[in-house]
Amino acid sequence: MSDAHRLLERISALFRAQLRRVSTEHGLKLVQLEALVYLDSANRYSDTPLALAEYLALTKGTVSQTLKALESSGLITKTPDEQDRRVQHCAVTAEGAAIVADALRIPADDGAPGLESALRSVLRSLQHSADARTFGVCNSCLHHQIEGGRARCGLTGEPLRKADRVKICREHEPVPLRT
């Protein structure tokens, strides 16, 4: 095992321990907290049960039960899509967002310049080797377009709200690196 693998394993273990602590404090299962964290960062193209299942690599049944529990606890709301009533969009409530903020509380990385860039590079490598969706931030996507000062998705042709542009999207395709 390389040092890089050991470091990633240790970081992951510490982060999951923090998530387990917060989930226990709030009476949640770990998978419920993970779903809340994802949904809090998902845009309107990615706030669906299917996208959640893909992101967390869970079965549809597990996701369905997880979302039922979160909804009955008042941590999310579900609304049908305006175009396709079979699709449900999930939104984190203020109470759910407070739990997410607690779960993601980490010390500032003032002493580690370049840390985010290095982690992003490792993530891209892992996603590429696993042929996994990137679930990247909308405004960093190949399809993100600005026309006449307005943002729109080049894939769907729809205008993008400011809130959508800074959240993750399951349709994300990274802009190819220029060499």
Image (cartoon, grey):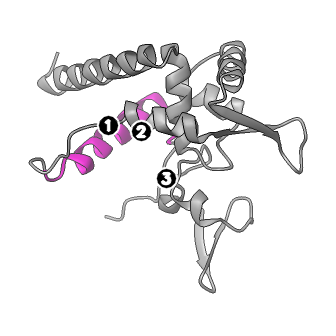
| Residue name at image x 89 percent, y 50 percent | 83
Q: On the rendered structure, is 178 left or right of 68?
A: left
Residue 137's disc is 3
Q: On the rendered structure, is 118 left or right of 85?
A: left
| Residue name at image x 68 percent, y 23 percent | 67
Q: CA distance from mark 1 to mark 3?
A: 20 Å
Look at the numbered discs 2 and 1 and tell me whether their residues touch, using CB distance below 8 Å: yes
For the N terminus, give its image quadrant. top left
What residue is disc 2 on? 101
Asked if residue 62 is positioned above or below residue 92 in the image, the reply reads above
Q: Main secondary structure of the magenta part?
A: helix
Looking at marks 3 and 2 on the same chain, the residue that comes earlier in the sequence is marked by 2
Q: Over which residues does the magenta segment extend?
A: 113-134
- Considering depth in this image, is 164 or 26 the residue closer to the camera? 26
**Residue 167, position as x, y percentages in the image:** 53, 52
Amino acid, disc 2? Ala
**Residue 30, position as x, y percentages in the image:** 48, 16
What residue is disc 1 on? 105
